[in-house]
Image: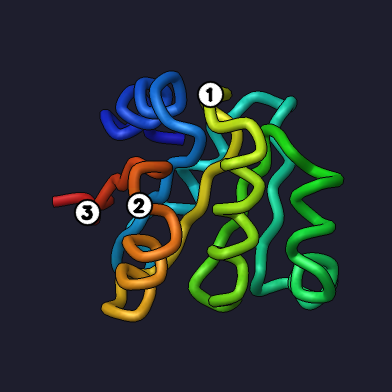
Amino acid sequence: MIKRHYLSLLFEYLELFPCVAVLGVRQCGKTSLLGNLSADWVLYDLEKLDDYNLIARDPDLFFRLHPNQVAIDESQLLPGLFSALRVAIDNDRSKTGRFILTGSSSPALLTSISESLAGRVAVIDLSPFT
């Protein structure tokens, strides 16, 4: 796997914010970037039906049961996720490095993040290799 300079930025943001959102166009390496996380992180992919159903059934309960080191790939597929994540973050606002979201860039996703997670999330705009 090629080490990207975004990896050090991801780790830096995790030390400062409770949540980091990694956004970018399709196939730019968002999921591959998550592959560099330690084994302590649990990855959920919302394109997998089991993962989607687990979180979508009750997002608030999901975050109560999984309060730390959770990465959710393709977060744009579940818009209700963002308000539940805001509640989870606010339950322990001072703790950083708890959640990572990835998503394909879209106006709807940016609106969801900016409205629900303002001040709680750092955003990395991942660009494809050049």
Q: Earlier in the sequence, mark 1 or mark 3?
A: 1
103 lies left or right of 122? right
Residue 127 disc label? 3
54 lies left or right of 127? right
The residue that label 1 is drawn on is 94
The residue that label 2 is drawn on is 118
The residue type indicated by label 3 comes to: Ser
Q: Earlier in the sequence, mark 2 or mark 3?
A: 2
**Distance (Cα) linking label 2 and label 1:** 15 Å
Extreme residue in the left direction: 130
- Looking at the rendered structure, the secondary structure element under dot 1 is loop
The residue type indicated by label 2 comes to: Ala
Q: Earlier in the sequence, mark 2 or mark 1?
A: 1
Q: Residue at horizontal 70%, vertical 33%? A: 68
- Looking at the rendered structure, the secondary structure element under dot 3 is loop
The residue type indicated by label 1 comes to: Ser
